[in-house]
Image (cartoon, grey):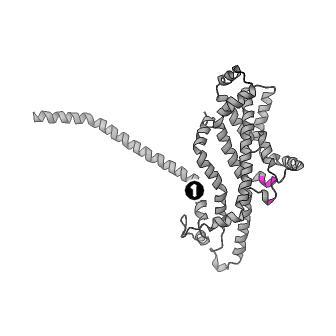
Amino acid sequence: MANAQLTDKVKISDKLDPALRFQAIKRSKNIIGTIFFYFILLSLSFVFLYPLLYMISKSLMQSWDVADATVRWIPHEFNIHNYKVAFTAMKYWQGFMNSSIISFGSAALQIISCSLIGYGFARYRFPLYGLWFVLLIFTFLVPPQTIVVPLYMFFSELGWINTHLPFIVPAAFGHGLQGSLFILIFIQFYRQLPKVLEEAARIDGAGAFRTYWQIMFPLGKPAMVTVFLFSIVWHWNDNFQPSLYLRLPPFYNLAQRMNGFYGQATMTADQMGASVSSSAIGMAPTVMNQMMAGVVLSIIPILILYLFVQRNFVESVERAGIAGE
């Protein structure tokens, strides 16, 4: 009897072994796959985060820590004096206000103007539609550097140099920095919306503009968030056009002030280096820590903004059709 029970157990264990073995192999593959996935994810994250981590690390170092080859990331003593120097030298609040006026003002106006133009292209067929659409693509493809001379002469004749008008006024008419790209984003988004919404609004007596403003425009929130964030970031970091139209220091934005601070700090380091004796090679004065502090200060507002709108931005990119849907 006992031998029979033992034989049955052996038979049962023989039947379960393949299944258990399969589950164990599957579990091992899942663990290895998860480890490999996080390894690739962390590696890619480090590549993108390396410049930011490098700037923060250098900005908290003393000058001798920067010159010390044995100090890579963590300084012997954390120092925030570099931020005080950069904050004062850049006249941070003045530059912050100028950057905010240009960036947020242009972004708000581009949302309204580019949304209206994009809706028109997406929903209506007007005379010379193909020609206007080709011109839109043409403005997207032409580099802004090629038309900057006639634009500068035009704005100069209007008396707009050293004002914020060269950035604000074009944005109100669907132009400005990357305005044609924002129009294409709204075209793609409005083409995805069902036409029954507009037909229902027209049955209720709404005209074309009222249908757009009260029905379609509020539905464009995903595209608006995308355009808003892109417009702010590109205007905030732009140094090319502000350096042309803003020639007096009170109108400089943060990017221009960072350039000025870089030149001033480099000149100071060269003057200090000239007084160092030849026997002190390798200990030449450096202001890299102060320049890194200035860079961090100039991008902090954009990082804070991105932290608040990150979730909405990712969802908006997917719903606006930019992800390739």
Mark 1 is on which residue type?
Tyr
Q: Is residue 218 above or below residue 156?
A: above
Instruction: Where is residue 96? Give x, y as percent.
Output: 71, 56
Point 75% across, 37% down: residue: 113
Return the residue nearer the eye: 181 or 159. Answer: 159
Instruction: Where is residue 291? Give x, y as percent.
Output: 66, 63
Residue 187, picture quadrant: top right
Quarter placement of the N terminus:
top left
Q: Is residue 215 left or right of residue 50?
A: right
Q: Is residue 247 above or below residue 192?
A: below
Residue 214 appears in view: yes
Q: Residue furthest left?
A: 1
Stretch in magenta: 242-248
What element does badge 1 sit on?
helix
Point 60% across, 68% down: residue: 66
Point 66% across, 33% down: residue: 218
Mark 1, Cα crowd under 10 Å, few <14 / some 14-19 / many 20+, is: few
Residue 81 magenta = no
Residue 175 appears in view: no
Q: Is residue 72 left or right of residue 280?
A: left
Return the residue nearer the eye: 189 or 128. Answer: 189
Q: Is residue 310 left or right of residue 278?
A: left
Q: Is residue 53 above or below residue 215?
A: below
Dot 1 corresponds to which residue? 50
Residue 246 magenta = yes
Return the residue nearer the eye: 275 or 237. Answer: 237
Point 61% across, 64% down: residue: 59
